[in-house]
Amino acid sequence: MKTLTSIYVDKQILKQAKELGLNISKICENALKIYITRLQGINTEIGNMGSARVRSLVW
C-alpha cells in the first residue's frame, strides 16, 4: 500500500528531473530501499554499535 508524503528537494534538481521525465516518486522509493538494505546489512555485520556510527558507514 502506498501513502502520500512530502519531501524537500533542491529546486534545480527537481527541475532537471522533471525535464528528463523521471519518475521522482519511484526513484525516491528505490533509493530508500537501497539505504534500508545497506543499514540492515551493516547492523547484521557489525552488531549494535549505535545508529550514528552505522549512518557514518553508509553515507
Image (spheres, rainbow, N blue to C red):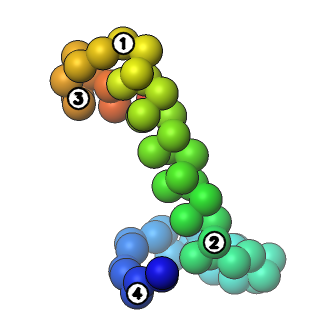
Q: Single out the residue that lies furthest toward the bottom.
A: 4
Q: Nearer the viewer, mark 1 or mark 4?
A: 1
Q: Between marks 4 and 3, how big is the CA–CA gap?
A: 28 Å
Give how far apart the Cα atoms at labels 1 and 3 are: 13 Å
User: Label 4 near label 2: C-beta < 8 Å?
Assistant: no
What residue would you read off at disc 3?
52
- Label 1 neighbourhood size at 10 Å, few (<14), some (14-19), many (20+)? few
Sooner in the amino-acid sequence: mark 1 or mark 4? 4
Q: Amino acid at mark 3?
A: Ala
Q: Quadrant of residue 48?
A: top left
**Marks 1 and 3: which is nearer the front?**
1
Tell me the tag on residue 46: 1
- Report the amino acid beneath label 4: Leu
Instruction: Give coordinates of residue 4: x percent, y percent.
Output: 40, 87
Q: Which residue is mark 2?
A: 26
Q: Choose between 3 and 20: the one closer to the eye.
A: 3
* In front of the other: 8 or 12: 8
The amino acid type of the residue labelled 1 equals: Ile
Give the distance between the C-alpha atoms of the residues marked 1 and 4, in whole angstroms: 34 Å
| Residue at (30, 15) in percent of width and height | 47
